[in-house]
Image (cartoon, rainbow, N blue to C red):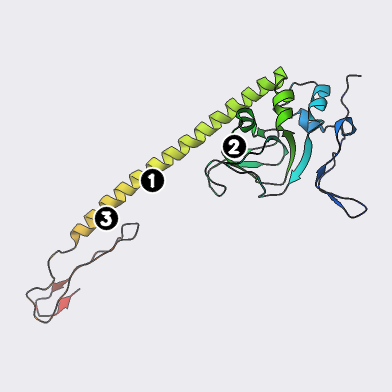
Amino acid sequence: RNERRSNPEPASFPLNRSDGTRVDSDQRKGRERRVPDTIGNTSLFRGVPAEQVDAIVSPCELRTCEKDEVLFRGGEYHRCVLVNLEGKLHVHLDSPDSQFFLELGGGESVGELSVADGNPVTAWVIAATPCRLLVIPEPVFLFTVLAVARIARNLIVLMSERMRRSDAHILTRVRAALELESLQRELDFARQIQSSILPVARLFANVEGIEGRGFMRAARHVGGDFYDAFPLPDGPVFA
């Protein structure tokens, strides 16, 4: 029978056994573990026969992660590809606390380029929510996964879509940086204008007993206040 068998409700890890031990991931191997339907429905395995998917993922690990868990660190070797089965991952290109990131939802994968070219990962991958992941070791990905023509085609499509999203992300950041630079130039010019209003010479030079000078140091923004000082006709000084 060319029919796929799968658990209607896959086990959720971590599990607590009756003897009190904790199991953080699925430790079953080979055919003794049934593959969840969500794996075959991911973008990477879309269109691949169920039996072939079962054979590919049988040596792989199913694991869960908590919110804010760091899965990949930029500059490090991780030697695996993560397929996100459930939840959301954030890919930070600059630093783990950067406000700019790419979001990967269920069915998307990460780590393919690092495994393919043998270089360290270039981004931080952090769980934005609790996630269920399929961990594909480097040898399985290189010699088994990429050997399937359909999966290789799916991977090219995935990488193309991610590059487009990354380009749009970078373009947005460049535009924001240019707008900030333009605003900074305008503020600098406004500060120069405001400073030029202040008197350069000593105030009340012809009034005995009074000495004064105008001084102002603006913060990052230009202030809206205006200062003036002058003698009144009947003798008092107004400031």
Disc 3: CA contacts within 10 A as few (<14), some (14-19) or many (>=20): some
Q: Is residue 48 left or right of residue 112?
A: right
Q: Is residue 42 visible?
A: no
- The mark closer to the camera, 2 or 3, is 2
Name the residue: 77% across, 42% down: 63
Question: Residue 180: which disc?
Answer: 1
For label 3, the SS is: helix
Dot 2 falls on a residue whose secondary structure is loop
Write down the residue under mark 3. 191
Q: How many marks?
A: 3
- Residue on which the image places disc 2: 120
Question: The C terminus appears in which quarter of the rendering?
Answer: bottom left
In the rendered image, residue 77, in percent from the top left (x then y), is placed at 63, 39
Who's the residue at 83% across and 32% down the image?
35
Element class at badge 1 = helix
Quarter of the figure that contains the N terminus: top right
In primary-sequence order, the first of circles 1 and 3 is 1
Give the residue type that dot 2 points to: Pro
Q: Which of the labelled discs sits on residue 4, or is there none?
A: none
Locate residue 157, reporting x and y percent.
62, 23
> Residue placed at 70% from the left, 17% from the top?
149
Can the viewer see residue 113? yes
Q: Residues within 10 Å of mark 1 (few under 14, many from 20)?
A: few
Is 16 in front, or is 143? 143
